[in-house]
Amino acid sequence: MEYRDDIEKSAEYLRLALAHMGRHKAGMHPVSYAIWYEYVAGINPALRERIDALLEDGKELDDSAVHRLFRDHVAEIDAHTAQRVSESFGKVMDKVSVSTSQVAAEASQFGRVLERWSEDVAAGRHVTTPTHNAAELLSYSHAMRQTVRALHTRLEESHREVETLRKEVERAREEAMIDGLTGLTNRRGFDRALADHLNGNDGLTQGPSLLLADIDRFKRINDDYGHLCGDKVIRAVAKILRDNVKGKDIAARYGGEEFVVVLPETPVEGALHLAEKIRRTIEASRIKRVGSNEVVASVTISLGVASWRPGESQSELIARADRALYQSKQLGRNRVTPAAGA
């Protein structure tokens, strides 16, 4: 999830998140803060729906529940990276904590010196030891300047370290959204991207269209030519999909031999046209068996196309596209079928 809230909004979300955290059994740690931040900010509909369901049952969230929510709805990096980043961030915060404690101690000492000097002035005692008092004040003032300067340096260092961690997390998130075999967006990345598009739609603008595709008789390809050849077919289909999307469009591997294309601003007519173009391209392609020039026979795909309708949920949109895909299979495969109501 990308956070773009300004300091005023994020401060308000912090206040609201802390209020929620205080009402539950889970510790006041970054994992708990992350789920409540996204909850109060309203940027994670699936998480909000899940938490609301738990709260309706009168449950208090403990650490187990919080970590499960984080894993299912927030985490976008692997556990090893998350642990390493968490430890590094902890070290950064420890450094800042030590520096701020030093400043607090110096400020407290300086305040006591000023208070004593003020008492001396009020009692007329400064007349006898003005030089001593001035020297002491100058000494503590110099010490304060040095401490504040050190804190400033430490904060600059911490800022650089946090920026490095941020880039590492962004890189890990991107990698976690990529399918290893094809290089396309994976199922998780697709779910997140489609949710973002639907969440940002006001019901007045053109909603996304979906192409749901499945390689025909893929099991037979694996059985006749082997799994290495099957993987090659999947990569070849993925490349054709990638070559035919542009701009904000997203091609993803939905699972196994299934693919999905998200077209954020394309009406159903344009989606059907693209689906037919992809179908023809794959039908005309000649994919050779691994290690030889033998052509894999009859690689085709079936597609279902659906365009979002106002008020429709993510699962309902996908279900309509899936039913259209199933109809393509039932009607003989290697064809494009629009969903009911498109």
Image: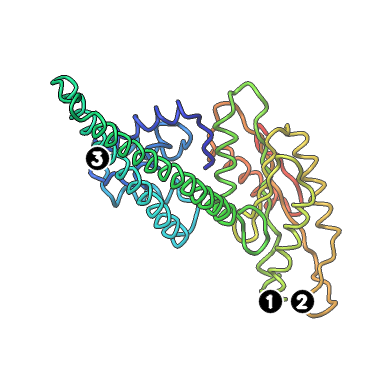
Mark 2 lies on residue = 290
Task: Out of 165 and 48, give the one closest to the viewer.
Answer: 165
Q: Nearer the viewer, mark 2 or mark 3?
A: 3
Q: Nearer the viewer, mark 2 or mark 1?
A: 2
Residue farthest toward the left in the current orientation of the protein: 123
Residues at marks 3 and 1, CA–CA distance in whole angstroms? 53 Å
Residue type beneath disc 1: Gly
Secondary structure at numbered mark 2: loop
Residue type beneath disc 3: His
CB under 8 Å between discs 2 and 1: yes
Task: Out of 242 and 135, give the one closest to the viewer.
Answer: 135
Of mark 3 and mark 1, the one earlier in the sequence is 3
Residues at marks 2 and 3, CA–CA distance in whole angstroms? 57 Å
Task: Out of 107 and 209, give the one closest to the viewer.
Answer: 107
Mark 3 lies on residue = 24
Image quarter in which the C terminus is found: top right
